[in-house]
Amino acid sequence: MAGFRFLTAGESHGQSLGAILEGVPAGLPLTAEQIASDLARRQRGYGRGARQQIERDRADIVSGVRHGITLGSPILLLVRNRDWENWTRVMQVEPLSEDEAAELTVAAEGGDKRSTPVTRLRPGHADLAGAIKYDFSDVRNVLERASARETAARVAAGAVARAFLAALGIEVWSFTAEVGGVAVDPERSTRTREEAEESPLRCPDPEAESRMIARIDEARSNGDTVGGVFEVVAHGLPVGLGSYVHWDRRLDAALAAAVMSINIVKGVELGLGFEQTRRFGSAVHDVIEGRDEDGRWIHRSNNAGGLTGGVTNGQPIVVRGAVKPISTLARPLPSADLITGRPVEKAHYERSDISVVPAAGIVGEAMVLLTLMNFALEKFGGDTLADTRDALEHYRARSAATHDQADGSGPAGSPGSTAAASASSGESGSGGDD
Ligand code: EPS
């Protein structure tokens, strides 16, 4: 899996967030405009906090692209933090001179919150564990990187993966499935994808959305926060991404890890997820209907969420992320002080969001896109986009020919005819795939 990877860098109130992508094939058209639309989507959503009024996220493509086409070299993306201007001294990279340190002390003594070291730990945030781990006496050193602001860099990287996968006919989107215990009802999900995208919570069910908004308002008026569930769906995948042969080659496991890595996510489900445990097998497993006229394998349902044995089965991939309520509360919980170790009445509070489920869905899309790109490149490879496409087409032709041959209707000597012979004598469809 060394072929494709990405990393992010940056602090929430530092100069910029960065993402570096390595292993993107050459020949992919890519512009900052394509990335900007995903970044803007991440900033929206009812329940977002004041920070999003300050930021106008856009990524500069610093390297890896020339004249709008990727070069195969590392792609460096930079998203500037507009809020940085308000934090230059507090977040200064250079050592503080005596005068500068004194300036901060005076500001803190004058009640400036930004200049005051953070020691009152927020329950639910990385504050305590991070400060102990890295031996910090100021929790700002933790929260600046643990902040979900970092997800802007992931979304920028995800937009590159989106462009790559779109060129292979694969697309990924998401919606808000639940907020504060109010869930969408598929029967009442009358909005088109575009309409859902434009709605305040990126939600396909208008009636549920009104009740979700009421839950967010309730949280706001109580100085509280509220979580929910987002659902990411991927269409257009060939059968056969991922593998059942090793734990770390299973696409389901990689997707679960990728989505779980999102700052606020505490649970991941694929397809029916935990609901499967409450049903009999006959009400869970997706009956295979056979092939349609276009040669695609059709399942009667998609409870497996597009993955069996850790391998794509041609159905859409469905991944759900459980979003905990944001841990910075306007009416803070009681906590303890990092330095004294003694209880304090209120945890730290600067400002926060009330709910971020629609934004978390966009981050979920990014993590799914990046994971699928990794697996697509692992399977099809390619120094250029055309190489990847050729390999995908060859594979599609091979897998179609395999089964035409089994029907007795395939072209003799077609690519994969050896595989066709062994597949037809095998026990495909006998179960045991998961
Ligand atoms: C975020 C920016 C942050 C928070 C939020 C996500 O801005 P600030 O900390 O300046 O108010 O709104 O971060 C958190 C929820 C968190 O726990 O750190 C963003 O751009 O997404």
Image (cartoon, rainbow, N blue to C red):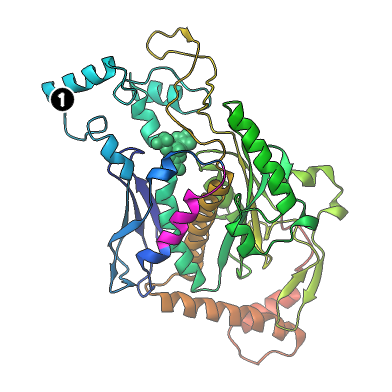
122 vs 270, nearest the viewer: 122
Residue lying at 77% horizontally and 45% vertically, measured from the top left = 275
283 vs 343, nearest the viewer: 343
Q: Which residue is mark 1?
A: 100
Q: Quadrant of residue 423?
A: bottom right
Q: Position of residue 356 (x, y in %)?
A: 55, 42
Q: Position of residue 272 (x, y in %)?
A: 74, 50
Magenta part of the protein: which range?
Answer: 35-46
Residue lying at 32% horizontally and 72% vertically, measured from the top left = 68
**39 in the magenta segment:** yes
Residue lying at the far left of the rendered structure = 98
Q: Give the side of residue 89 with respect to residue 365, left or right.
A: left
Give the answer, above or below, for where 331 lies relative to 145. above
**117 in the magenta segment:** no
| Amino acid type at mark 1 | Glu
Residue lying at the far bottom of the rendered structure = 412
**Is most of the magenta stretch helix, strand or loop?**
helix
Q: Position of residue 277 (x, y in %)?
A: 79, 43
Give the answer, above or below, for where 103 lies relative to 380. above
